[in-house]
Image: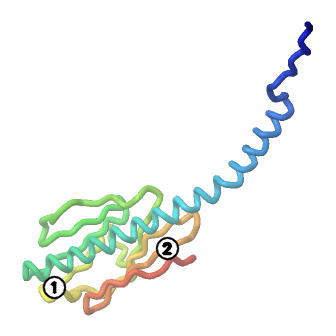
Amino acid sequence: MNCPPLKNQGFSLPEVMIVFFVIAILVVLAVPQLNASLQLNRIQTASSLVAAKLSEAKSIAVKQNKSVSFVVDENNLKVWIESGSTVIGSVEQLPQGTKIKISPDTSATKEYITFNSMGTLSTTPATISPFYEAKKLELPISVSMSGKITLGEIRSY
């Protein structure tokens, strides 16, 4: 008895190439969306960090009954809290790729937003905006004279 020859059960080269081509097209379409989501996430992370540090500075000022400053080093992209010249807590680095601007701008390399013992500002009200320059997106955080901290919405500039 002769058995019929077995047919090749594998894929042909053109079939494999078509599958790889379709996968490559999907990757090319997905990468820009993934990159945009990553930058948006970094801006949101930076804004959350700044808002949390501002709230912490205000809380410490009230609890310790003294003036406490939230400090932003725009050149090194770091934020921290200090009283006098003593750093309170940790110095935080903003996420890679984000920058920060403060309005009104004093053109100083370090900006101070100071809360008094009542939790109100003893400096000019400010807007702190972490931003991503390449996509022209920012997420502003406003601090009013009463010490109220308001996180805005992402916007283009």
The answer to the question of whether label 2 and label 1 lie on touching residues, with beta carbons closer than 8 A, is: no
Image x and y of residue 132, in percent: 51, 65
Residue at the spot x=26%, y=78% of the render? 113
Q: Quadrant of residue 58?
A: bottom left
Residue at the spot x=66%, y=54% of the render? 30
- Residue 7 sits above or below residue 66 on the image: above
Residue at the spot x=43%, y=70% of the render? 130
Image x and y of residue 12, in percent: 85, 28
**Residue 7 falls left or right of residue 43:** right
Residue type for callout 1: Asn
**Residue 75 falls left or right of residue 113:** right
In the image, which disc is placed on residue 138?
2
- Residue 119 sits above or below residue 132 on the image: below
Q: CA distance from mark 2 to mark 1?
A: 28 Å
In the image, which disc is placed on residue 116?
1
- Check disc 2 and report its element: helix, strand or loop: strand
In which quadrant will I find the C terminus?
Answer: bottom right
Image x and y of residue 129, in percent: 42, 75
The one of 89 and 24 positioned closer to us in this rendering: 24
